[in-house]
Image (tube, grey):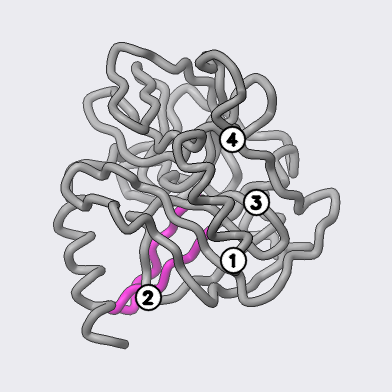
Amino acid sequence: MSIHCELLILILALTLDGQVHTGEIIGGWEAAAHSRPYMVLLEGHMPSGKTKHCGGFLLKEDFVMTAAHCMACSYTVLLGVHNFHKSNGIQRTSVVQTFPRKDYNETDLSNDIMLLKLSSKANFSTNVRPIALAGQGDGSLPKSCIISGWGRTDKDKHMSVILMEANVTISTECEKEKSYCTEGETGPGNGDSGGPLVCEDGKAYGVVSSGALNKYSYAKIPDYRSWIDLIMNQH
């Protein structure tokens, strides 16, 4: 374990304390099994030996998108998951290279977006497929969207065994630069970070970043499309 990696994880742990909403995807329900084949469950391996869970989503056979604050020293990437206690059909791989935004700010979680290059290519199937990303030319602001993940579901901080999802509505009242915002009791929980904000046209518009006081923030994918395309084309 490199000293750099240990310091990075320590900084992330300190800056994220108290910023990420804990609890289930409030107002959510169990997703239909494998109805979101782009969903990825990330197991981030930390210097302490503990495992940190985040969400992610498949962009192509060897690239996953997640949040920059989900940085870990190494990863196990699980594809094709619905109930993670049932391993049948789940594809497991690792990450060979990470691409967090260089302007990611650990303090305010701005530019909280990261690409992961997989060590082996995903085998596409009914249960494992990429999702299209929204671009700058996708028209007006989306409103009705869906979030999904395996985030924590109780005060004991246990992850949900099954994939949950919920409807959210994008608000212009709390938006920040390069981010979307949703408000209300329905929102992502701790462990849902890095999952996609999927809107009416079925494209991913945002990356789950943080939440507090019934306000939830998502990195705005259209504002990062040139960077995303550049990384994936060069690697």
Q: Residues within 10 Å of mark 2 (few under 14, many from 20)?
A: some
Q: Marks 2 and 1: in contact by CB < 8 Å?
A: no
Q: Earlier in the sequence, mark 1 or mark 2?
A: 2
In the rendered image, the quadrant that contains the C terminus is bottom right
- The residue that label 4 is drawn on is 204
- The residue that label 2 is drawn on is 73
Using the rendered image of the protein, determine whether residue 88 is visible from the camera's viewpoint.
Answer: no
Which secondary structure class fits the magenta region best?
A: strand
Which residue is depicted at the point 66% across and 70% down? 92
> Looking at the image, which is closer to me, 145 or 80?
145
Seen from this angle, which residue lies furthest right? 126
* In the image, residue 80 above or below residue 213: below
- The residue that label 3 is drawn on is 59
- Measured in 3D between alpha carbons, the distance from the residue under mark 1 to the one under mark 2, in whole angstroms, is 23 Å
In the rendered image, the quadrant that contains the N terminus is bottom left
Which residue is depicted at the point 28% across and 18% down? 174
Q: Amino acid at mark 2?
A: Cys
- Measured in 3D between alpha carbons, the distance from the residue under mark 4 to the one under mark 3, in whole angstroms, is 10 Å
Residue 44 among magenta residues: yes
* In the image, residue 53 above or below residue 107: below
Q: Quadrant of residue 84?
A: bottom right
Residue 78 in the image: x percent, y percent? Answer: 62, 63
Q: Earlier in the sequence, mark 4 or mark 1?
A: 4
Mark 2 or 4: in front is: 4
